[in-house]
């Protein structure tokens, strides 16, 4: 029987070890012997792959950003990916965003989410935890993610803040009882607020040695995950950390029926006509690939965004063309002295 040495590398907002263990115990798991171990270091994980002590490394795509050269030097590459399960952040608060009082204090570690919140609800005080500590002159030092979010929950319970933003999986880990409001990319009503996920949110990549058998990787990989990785890596792979923190990005597979229902509800005639011929018949039976990217000014008043929906067979060419469009739009904004990076 074939035997696979599997290594997982996790972070609190993307617990890869839990995701893979759930897969190994499911009916989709292959009938092969899998020996799984956890790692707490990207460097040691690469060494394990390079030495042949491990065959596949499953890790958060976010942890790979800026480290791909190290991966290539170890004669390894991304061989597959698994689609995000919970990419959207949640607001822990009594009220939804649109019902927050103008004096409400909302804390978020993510620069992107803070800008999205300012765009969606004017007047709120949207701060980072560090800014809150400084403004309130607190004698507090932030710890790791779990410690930080536990502290934010205590602030909320004491009514010192009105709410905070937390990754969905950490919300579940901490067993928080307060209501949560998911920050969704698709508003219920056209014109309502939308929230694109942060880069690489909950995306898992599968890293292995070059020329590792593709048929083995396909057992663990997902086609939608591979699509999402290719798109996000193409758009984000060369960005520095400062720019990455201001980007919202979404890539996913969509069914024609789901997309048309959404277009009908929002009275989006452009979307409806794009995938129907003159007789009203659907002009493709393929899975559709949707990708959206945006950046927002620090005050939330300006947004640069590009949206595309493309049949799966054409998405890679469209991805390249869209990235060029994105760069042109962004360059024009910089020429007009609109700052999307700072603050």
Image (cartoon, rainbow, N blue to C red):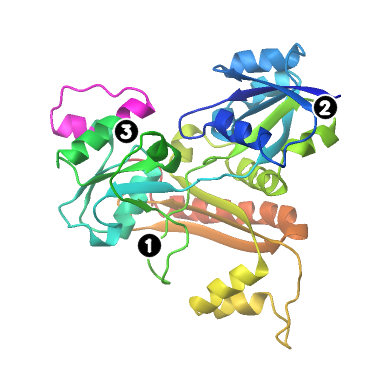
Task: Tell me the magenta residue range.
Answer: 131-148
Q: Which residue is mark 1?
A: 193
Which residue does the numbered mark 2 point to in the structure image? Answer: 212
- Pointer 2 and pointer 3: residues touching (CB < 8 Å)? no
SS assignment at label 1: loop
Mark in front: 1 vs 2: 2
User: Where's residue 40, x and y in %?
Assistant: 54, 17
Q: Which residue is mark 3?
A: 149
Q: Quadrant of residue 7?
A: top right
Residue 133 lies in the magenta stretch: yes
Q: Secondary structure at mark 2?
A: loop
- Judging depth in this view, the residue of 173 and 108 nearest the camera is 173
Real-space CA distance between mark 3 and mark 1, rounded to the nearest whole angstrom: 24 Å
Q: Quarter holding the N terminus?
A: top right
Relative vertical location of residue 161 with respect to residue 301 in this rendering, above or below: above
Query: Upstream in the sequence, badge 1 or badge 2?
Result: 1
x then y, percent, for residue 100: 22, 57
User: Can residue 65 be seen in this snapshot?
Assistant: no
Q: Secondary structure at mark 3?
A: helix
Q: CA distance from mark 2 to mark 3?
A: 40 Å
Quick check: is 130 in the magenta stretch?
no
Which quarter of the picture shows residue 277? bottom right
- Residue 33 sits in which quadrant? top right
Nearer to the camera, 342 or 145: 145
């Amino acid at each position: 029987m074939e035997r696979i040495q599997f290594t997982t590398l996790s972070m609190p907002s993307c617990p890869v070890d839990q995701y893979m263990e759930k897969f190994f115990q499911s009916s989709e798991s292959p009938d092969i012997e899998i020996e799984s171990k956890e790692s707490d270091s990207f460097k040691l994980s690469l060494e394990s792959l390079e030495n042949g002590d491990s065959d596949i490394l499953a890790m958060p795509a976010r942890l790979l950003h800026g480290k791909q050269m190290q991966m290539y030097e170890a004669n390894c590459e991304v061989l597959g990916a698994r689609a995000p399960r919970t990419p959207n952040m949640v607001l822990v608060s009594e009220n939804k965003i649109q019902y927050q009082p103008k004096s409400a204090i909302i804390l978020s570690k993510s620069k992107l989410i803070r800008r999205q919140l300012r765009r969606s609800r004017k007047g709120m005080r949207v701060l980072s935890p560090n800014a809150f500590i400084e403004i309130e002159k607190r004698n507090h030092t932030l710890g790791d993610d779990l410690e930080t979010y536990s502290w934010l929950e205590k602030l909320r319970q004491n009514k010192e803040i009105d709410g905070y933003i937390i990754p969905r999986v950490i919300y579940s880990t901490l067993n928080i009882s307060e209501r949560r409001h998911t920050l969704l990319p698709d508003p219920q009503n056209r014109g309502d607020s939308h929230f694109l996920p942060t880069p690489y949110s909950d995306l898992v990549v599968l890293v292995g040695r070059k020329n590792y058998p593709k048929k083995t990787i396909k057992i663990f990989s997902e086609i939608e995950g591979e699509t999402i990785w290719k798109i996000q890596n193409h758009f984000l792979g060369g960005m520095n950390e400062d720019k990455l923190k201001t980007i919202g990005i979404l890539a996913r597979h969509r069914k024609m029926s789901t997309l048309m229902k959404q277009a009908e509800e929002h009275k989006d005639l452009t979307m409806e006509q794009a995938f129907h011929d003159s007789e009203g018949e659907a002009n493709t039976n393929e899975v559709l690939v949707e990708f959206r990217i945006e950046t927002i000014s620090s005050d939330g008043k300006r947004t640069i965004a590009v949206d595309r929906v493309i049949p799966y067979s054409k998405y890679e060419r469209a991805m390249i063309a869209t990235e060029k469009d994105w760069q042109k739009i962004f360059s024009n904004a910089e020429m007009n002295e609109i700052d999307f990076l700072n603050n």
